[in-house]
Image (cartoon, rainbow, N blue to C red):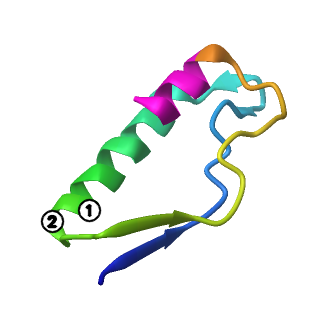
C-alpha cells in the first residue's frame, strides 16, 4: 500500500491580504497528478485543511471538488 502523508493545507488563507485561491487550486492539481503518477492508495491529511473555523465557500468547494 502506498500512502502520501500531507499536512496543513490552510485553504482560504490570505497572505498579506492577497487571495491565494489560484495558488491553492494549483496545489490540488499537483497533488492529484502525484497521486495518479505514483499510484497512491491513500492520502493522509494530518493537519489543518482550512485556515479558519469558518472558511470561505470557495475553500470548501476546492476541498470537496
- State how many labels appear: 2
Q: Residues within 10 Å of mark 2 (few under 14, many from 20)?
A: few
In the rendered image, residue 45 lying in the magenta stretch gets the answer no
The rendered magenta stretch, by its main secondary structure, is classed as helix
Mark 2 and mark 1: Cα distance apart in space: 5 Å
Q: What residue lies at 81% left-to-right and 25% top-to-bottom?
A: 54
Above or below, 9 relative to 50: below
Residue at figure coordinates x 29%, y 51% from the top left: 32
Vertical comparison of 33 with 41: above or below:
above
Question: In which quarter of the view is residue 16 placed?
Answer: top right
Where disc 2 sits, the SS reads helix
**Which residue in the structure is indicated by mark 2?**
37
- In the picture, which quadrant includes the N terminus? bottom left
Asked if residue 61 lies left or right of residue 54, the reply is: left
Residues drawn in magenta: 58-65
Q: Residue drawn 31% across and 43% down?
A: 29
Q: Helix, strand or loop at disc 1?
A: helix
Q: Quadrant of residue 36?
A: bottom left
Could you tell me if the residues under marks 2 and 1 are in contact, i.e. CB atoms within 8 Å?
Answer: yes
Q: Which mark is residue 34?
A: 1
Percent x, y for residue 58? 56, 18
Q: Is residue 63 left or right of residue 26?
A: right
Residue at image position (68%, 44%) is: 10
Does 44 sit left or right of 46 as displayed?
left
Amino acid at each position: 500500500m502506498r500512502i502520501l502523508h500531507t499536512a496543513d493545507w490552510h485553504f482560504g488563507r490570505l497572505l498579506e491580504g492577497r487571495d491565494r485561491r489560484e495558488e491553492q487550486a494549483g496545489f490540488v492539481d499537483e497533488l492529484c497528478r502525484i497521486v495518479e503518477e505514483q499510484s497512491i492508495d491513500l492520502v493522509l491529511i494530518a493537519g489543518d485543511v482550512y485556515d479558519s473555523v469558518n472558511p470561505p465557500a470557495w475553500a470548501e468547494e476546492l476541498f470537496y471538488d
